[in-house]
Image: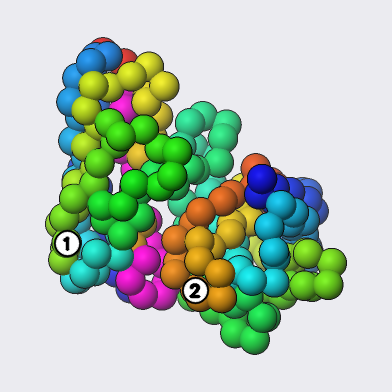
């Protein structure tokens, strides 16, 4: 069974930095592209970033480009999101999400973690 | 960016009803459209991918249709477990985008 567990969400001041982690298990992690998706509590869903299964290619939503960096450690089955220059509008629940097809990026969000809450506030 | 418009934003229905939710894209997606169900306090759950393919384990009362810019999620014989918020998501091109959601409530 696929298991994704996010951690690292805390309260941080505007302009601060944070690193989110996602521990993956129950599947061959290095075969799947992974995403971060966020949701302001009570609001809709926003795709944040994507990293291909081999870590060779990354993509970002414009609203985080240049501030956030996605990475992965396939030897440890971990996904990361380094968040810099945080803004109040980055406050959200951040989900770690697994793509559907192995060794192919199909943009289908097959499995989700339970999320970690990031609050940016002074 | 591709804009996704869902309608209605909310609806009230009774157990046993047939419910239809629509999603319109600002440009053609071919069939690259997914549907998710989200219950309060839980992560979204993929129901339908590529417009009409039912994910393994999802009840057959859920169905999807459409192509191009107009898509539909239908729930036939609505069950108590189906009261939730539903989102469409385009998987055609980056950046990936979602519809605003449709909340299905009990009448």
Residue A112 higher or lower than B10, as above or below: below
User: Residue A101 or A88: which is nearer the viewer?
Assistant: A101
Image quarter hosting the N terminus of chain B:
bottom left
Q: Is residue A74 visible?
A: yes
Circle on res. A16: none
> Label 2: which residue?
A105
Could you tell me how far apart the alpha carbons at marks 2 and 1 are, in whole angstroms? 21 Å
Residue A52, position as x, y percentages in the image: 59, 77
Place residue B79 in its image quadrant: top left
Label 1 resides on the chain identified as B
Magenta segment, which residues? B91-105
- Residue B77 at x, y = what percent? 23, 22
SS assignment for the magenta stretch, majority:
loop
- Are there few (<14), some (14-19), or many (20+) residues within 10 Å of tag 1? some
Question: Which quarter of the image is occupied by the C terminus of chain B?
Answer: top left
Residue B27, position as x, y percentages in the image = 19, 71
């Amino acid at each position: 069974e696929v298991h994704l567990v996010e951690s690292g969400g805390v309260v941080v001041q505007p302009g601060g930095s944070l690193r989110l982690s996602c521990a993956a298990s129950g599947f061959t992690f290095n075969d799947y592209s992974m995403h971060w998706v966020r949701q302001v509590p009570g609001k809709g869903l926003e795709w944040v970033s994507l990293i291909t299964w081999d870590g060779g290619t990354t993509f970002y939503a414009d609203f985080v480009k240049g501030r956030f960096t996605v990475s992965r450690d396939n030897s440890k089955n971990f996904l990361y999101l380094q968040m810099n220059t945080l803004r109040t509008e980055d406050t959200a629940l951040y989900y770690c999400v697994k793509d559907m097809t192995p060794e192919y990026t199909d943009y289908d969000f097959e499995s989700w973690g339970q999320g970690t809450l990031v609050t940016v506030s002074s | 960016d591709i804009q996704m418009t869902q309608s209605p934003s909310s609806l009230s229905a009774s157990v046993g009803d047939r419910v239809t939710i629509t999603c319109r894209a600002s440009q053609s997606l071919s069939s690259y459209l997914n549907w998710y169900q989200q219950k309060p306090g839980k992560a979204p759950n993929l129901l339908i991918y590529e417009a009409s393919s039912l994910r393994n384990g999802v009840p057959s009362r859920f169905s999807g249709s459409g192509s191009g810019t107009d898509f539909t999620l239908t729930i036939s014989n609505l069950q108590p477990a189906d009261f939730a918020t539903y989102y469409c998501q385009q998987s055609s091109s980056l950046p990936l985008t979602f519809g605003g959601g449709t909340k299905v409530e009990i009448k």
